[in-house]
Image: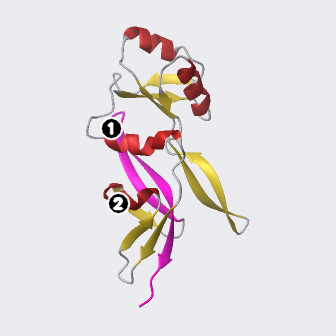
Amino acid sequence: MIYVVQTVPGEEMCVMTALNRENIPAFVPRRELLLRKGGRWEKVTDKLFPCYVFLECNYTPEMHRAVTALPGVIRWLGKPSPIQSSEEPFLRLLINNGLPIGQSRAVIAPDRTVTVTDGWLSDKTRYIKGYNFRKQRAYLELKFGGRTHRTSVSAVFTKVLL
């Protein structure tokens, strides 16, 4: 089962490393983004869900104490509650074997419909909740900790002229 712990901002990778060192599989889903800085597009790697680390374990009181004792961990989300079984396959896609989610490519038709042609999103369009063409983002949603969390991944859009 996958559980979520909240961390101090900026400590996600340190907490993940400490958990993995304790033989507790932990993940911080990441993405590659294009950001516009100084008039140019720059590629950066960023966290999909800042301040959250996902861990795969069987919850026990001993596990709770061991994880909570780590520097940078604030609390377990929920009672703690595992990720809903319906959301777990999507989360596993976002974990992406520990690699950052790369950029996808999409085509915008004249009627503003979008077709993803290449990249991580190409076979995951059912998870897309919206687009921001100017920021070159596709928006995704995942439910955990009793609420819906929205995030985005990078997508380069090309307009098709007819």
Q: Amino acid under label 2? A: Thr
Q: Is disc 1 placed on a helix, strand or loop?
A: helix
Instruction: Sort mark 2 into few (<14), some (14-19) or many (20+) by Cα contacts within 10 Å.
Output: some
Q: Which residue is mark 2?
A: 125
Residue at image x 28%, y 34%? 84
Segment colored magenta: 136-162
Image-based side of 40 in relation to 77, left or right: right
Q: In the rendered structure, find residue 88 and report the number of the disc placed on it.
A: 1
Residue at the farthest bottom position: 162
Residue drawn at x 36%, y 36% as measured from the top left? 144
* Left or right side of 79 for 48: right
Residue 73 image position (x, y, % from top left) = 54, 23
Spot occupied by residue 24 in the image (x, y as percentages of width and height): 48, 21
Main SS type for the magenta part?
strand
Identify the image quadrant of the C terminus.
bottom left
Q: Sequence-wise, which precedes: disc 2 or disc 1?
A: 1
Residue 96, percent from left and from top = 46, 44
